Image: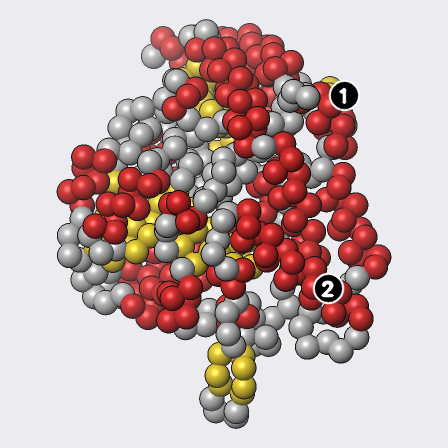
């Protein structure tokens, strides 16, 4: 049976609600995705039947909850083809996962004068933690620039490497431009120069197959909520040898083996990095999201998103009042489009679209340096997922044209200046 977005949408109750009396068109998937009924039911079932704190509990509920969480760890490892479940660390989100690496690896192994390579595409989550560390450790940050089409300039990237380079941390897919950097090539370049790598796969894992054995990064992070899963759950994959060498991130329950009044011995992986009560229910039900994505298949997801992206770009390119950022070729980007209407603040556009039931994101998208590179304060961002339809893209197009017509005097004034 072929891919049927209309049939799939029946699994997502929220897609049938109305906003301002109009059917919801949800184009804010890069911020968070909607949840299938199976995950919603699983979350309710956990609290109704299995709710207990994990590890060390001698009673049935604790044992059941522990089993569910550890099964989720194994299924997460299988999903990204990680070699062992112990290399999967559950965090609150991808941001915390990156902060874990900066604290536990960076503070232990980086020295004054060392260098970290980032890119101009990065989300604040993959900038600010390194900025804090650089200031503390007298480490230098260097940046791979982007070209006019939003792609990374790998010629310039090669010039950044030296014996001082200790880490390359970069996104696998831009949350603003949809840019898809050549992950394997960057990792290979880092390895040749003796540098470690961290891949921010937050915008990659929901849309494309992830294979850490093929890429072979030292660290990889992503968030459950961007891939049909619950909020409050992030994932850090780490190379086992590095995780063993790193110091704990947080202190407290479960990350210890033994504690004396003045000393402690850290626990084995993965508990070493999972202090305190984690997001138990969220971790326990995350496999429902992974199962759903596996059932749909990433080739079908990519094909559907490319169809939506191609039509959306056609609509935007036909409007002279629209500025589009990044590549205009759908095959060169993920399912994200950032644009502006000349002379209008992105929030005005987002509000006007919302009145037509179309949900988009506006602002700097936690990428202020990238916004400055683009010469704007913010953008309107439409982001697609496999449960979106061509009909919704057409609704988006009509809402956009209605917005342009409403603001036409202002747009003309802006264009005349």
Give the residue drawn at x 44%, y 14%.
322
Find disc 1 in the rendering and name its residue.
Answer: 21
Q: Label 2: few (<14), some or many (≥20) within 10 Å? A: many
Instruction: Please tell me whether mark 1 or mark 2 is closer to you in this view.
Output: 2
The percent coordinates of residue 189 (x first, y second) are 24, 45
Find disc 2 in the rendering and name its residue.
Answer: 65
Cα–Cα gap, marks 1 and 2:
42 Å
Which residue is nearer to you in this view: 249 or 211? 211
The percent coordinates of residue 376 (x first, y second) are 37, 29
Q: Earlier in the sequence, mark 1 or mark 2?
A: 1
Q: Quadrant of the C terminus?
A: top left
Give the residue drawn at x 60%, y 52%.
75
All told, the count of numbered labels is 2
- Disc 2 element: helix
* Quadrant position of residue 120: top left
Task: Give above or below for 142 relative to 50.
Answer: above
């Amino acid at each position: 049976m072929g891919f049927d977005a209309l049939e799939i949408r029946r699994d997502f109750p929220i897609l049938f609600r109305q906003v301002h009396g109009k059917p919801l068109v949800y184009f804010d998937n890069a911020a968070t995705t909607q949840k299938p009924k199976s995950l919603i039911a699983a979350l309710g079932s956990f609290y109704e039947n299995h709710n207990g704190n994990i590890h060390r509990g001698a009673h049935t509920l604790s044992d059941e909850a522990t089993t569910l969480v550890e099964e989720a760890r194994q299924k997460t490892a299988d999903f990204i083809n990680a070699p062992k479940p112990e290399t999967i660390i559950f965090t609150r989100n991808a941001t915390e996962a990156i902060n874990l690496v900066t604290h536990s690896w960076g503070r232990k192994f980086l020295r004054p004068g060392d260098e970290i390579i980032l890119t101009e595409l990065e989300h604040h989550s993959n900038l600010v933690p390194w900025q804090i560390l650089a200031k503390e450790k007298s480490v230098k940050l260097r940046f791979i620039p982007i070209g006019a089409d939003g792609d990374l300039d790998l010629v310039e990237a090669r010039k950044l490497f030296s014996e001082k380079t200790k880490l390359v941390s970069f996104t696998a897919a831009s949350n603003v431009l949809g840019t898809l950097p050549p992950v394997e090539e960057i990792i290979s370049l880092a390895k040749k120069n003796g540098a470690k790598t961290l891949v921010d796969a937050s915008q990659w894992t929901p849309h494309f197959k992830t294979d850490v054995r093929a890429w072979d990064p030292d660290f990889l992070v992503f968030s459950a909520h961007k891939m049909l899963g619950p909020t409050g759950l992030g994932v850090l994959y780490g190379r086992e040898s590095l995780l063993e060498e790193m110091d704990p991130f947080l202190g407290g329950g479960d990350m210890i083996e033994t504690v004396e009044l003045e000393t402690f011995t850290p626990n084995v992986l993965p508990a070493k990095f999972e202090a305190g009560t984690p997001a138990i229910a969220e971790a326990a039900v995350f496999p429902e999201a992974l199962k759903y994505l596996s059932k749909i298949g990433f080739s079908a997801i990519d094909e559907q998103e490319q169809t939506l992206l191609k039509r959306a770009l056609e609509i935007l390119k036909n409007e002279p009042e629209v500025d589009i950022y990044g590549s205009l070729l759908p095959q060169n980007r993920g399912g994200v489009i950032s644009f502006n209407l000349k002379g209008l603040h992105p929030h005005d556009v987002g509000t006007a679209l919302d009145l037509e039931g179309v949900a988009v994101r506006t602002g700097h998208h936690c990428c202020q340096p990238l916004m400055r590179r683009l010469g704007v304060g913010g953008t309107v961002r439409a982001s697609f997922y496999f449960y979106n339809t061509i009909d919704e893209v057409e609704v988006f197009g009509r809402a956009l044209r209605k917005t342009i017509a409403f603001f036409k005097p202002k747009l003309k004034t802006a264009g005349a200046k």
